[in-house]
Amino acid sequence: MSLFDRMVVKMLPVVPRVIVGAVASRYVAGDMVSDAIETAQALAADGAVATMDILGEEVRDKALAENYTNQYIALVDAIEASGISSSVSVKPTMLGLDITEELCEQNIERIFAHAAARKIRVAIDMEDHPTTDFTLRVHRRMHDQFGNAGTVLQAYMRRTLADIAALPVDNCQIRLCKGIYVEPESIAYKGYEEIRANYLLALEALFERGIFVGIATHDEYLVDRAIEIIQRRGLDASAYEFQMLLGVLPQLRSKILSGGHALRVYIPYGSDWYAYSVRRLRENPKVARHVMRAMIGLR
Ligand SMILES: Cc1cc2nc3c(=O)[nH]c(=O)nc-3n(C[C@H](O)[C@H](O)[C@H](O)COP(=O)(O)OP(=O)(O)OC[C@H]3O[C@@H](n4cnc5c(N)ncnc54)[C@H](O)[C@@H]3O)c2cc1C
């Protein structure tokens, strides 16, 4: 990242919300569940399926965690009513993990039970390392109880290969991503190339165990290597799909789809869009620069 880009990223907290909102709107479907459904319908016309995420994390109020749980249940109903192909993605800290593990697990279980009865899959997103053991334990329990469970492994974590070895195999779905949180070097790889290398090792290990993989990356190098691995192993659509975030690198999305691969787009929506948008902008200084230009233009 150049000095200018670093400066832009540092200044993001003082950028007016309205400007962040205007530039970041490509990453978020809108405020309402109907916005997410419409976005998924548009993506379906291009051949992509969806996973929907209600924005919010680090909830410390029990009533709010329960409110988000009810919003997820309503989301599952809306997906069923619309007939579109979509799973849902949930974050433990949004559903009460920072309050108590028991509360969070109960909320997660309610969502899984409701979704399983409607044959809709639920993925538990992976947050930072204090949540990893909880997430994997609850994923295992939901998998054994309901069978519609997925979760996420992060290639930057040194433990990931060991976590893959401990996964259930039957009907297990794992999203493999690089990982987005800032983790200490003692537990996480830091170098760009070593994270890529571990990503490919993890991908091979998941395929070796016959586990369905959501290959979640916008790194074209990894997409190309993954396609080589898929072809070498002679895998079909029952073994994998690619996954991308809404608004990120649409040209790569087209390349994957036109290559005949399944693609799932992660669609975030909800009123709590600001923190998510700033995180997306931090990851992409080119877009953050547009924010700065817009701000300077406005003033
Ligand atoms: C579907 C999906 C679900 C995810 N779920 C989780 C999760 O549960 N837990 C977790 O820790 N992480 C999650 N992530 C985030 C992931 O860990 C990475 O931080 C993120 O995808 C960036 O890594 P990359 O593999 O795309 O490679 P990078 O090397 O970071 O990016 C490759 C290219 O894509 C562009 N790019 C990447 N991200 C963005 C962006 N946001 N905006 C604009 N351009 C971008 C970059 O500019 C670069 O050119 C998820 C990612 C995806 C795609």
Image (tube, rainbow, N blue to C red):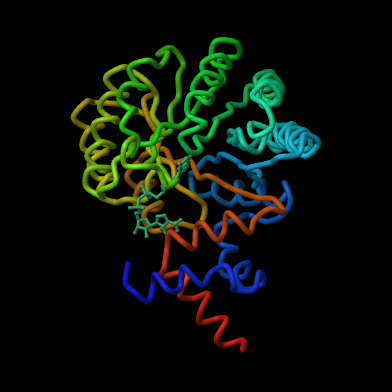
Q: Nearer the viewer, residue 281 or 8?
A: 8
Image location (x, y in percent) of residue 105: 65, 22
Q: Which residue is rendered at x = 54% and y = 30% of the image?
A: 123
Looking at the image, residue 3 lies above or below residue 100: below
Image quadrant where one finds the C terminus: bottom right
Which sits in the foreground, 198 or 190?
Answer: 190
> Height in image: 275 above or below 211?
below
- Answer with left or right where residue 134 lies relative to residue 215: right
Task: Say whether residue 148 is left or right of residue 184.
Answer: right
Q: Describe residue 120's horizontal placement relative to residue 168 as left or right.
A: right
Residue 88 percent across, percent down from the top left: 60, 34
- Name the image quarter holding the N terminus: bottom left
In this rendered view, identify the residue nearer to me: 242 or 61: 61
Which quarter of the picture shows residue 249? bottom left
Residue at point 26%, 32% (across, down): 230
Q: Position of residue 297 (x, y in %)?
A: 56, 88
Q: Position of residue 60 (x, y in %)?
A: 71, 40
Residue under the image location 51 percent in, 16 percent down: 140
Q: Residue furthest right?
A: 63
Query: Dividing the picture into quarters, in which one does residue 274 lie?
Result: bottom right
Residue 112, compared with residue 294, is above or below; it is above
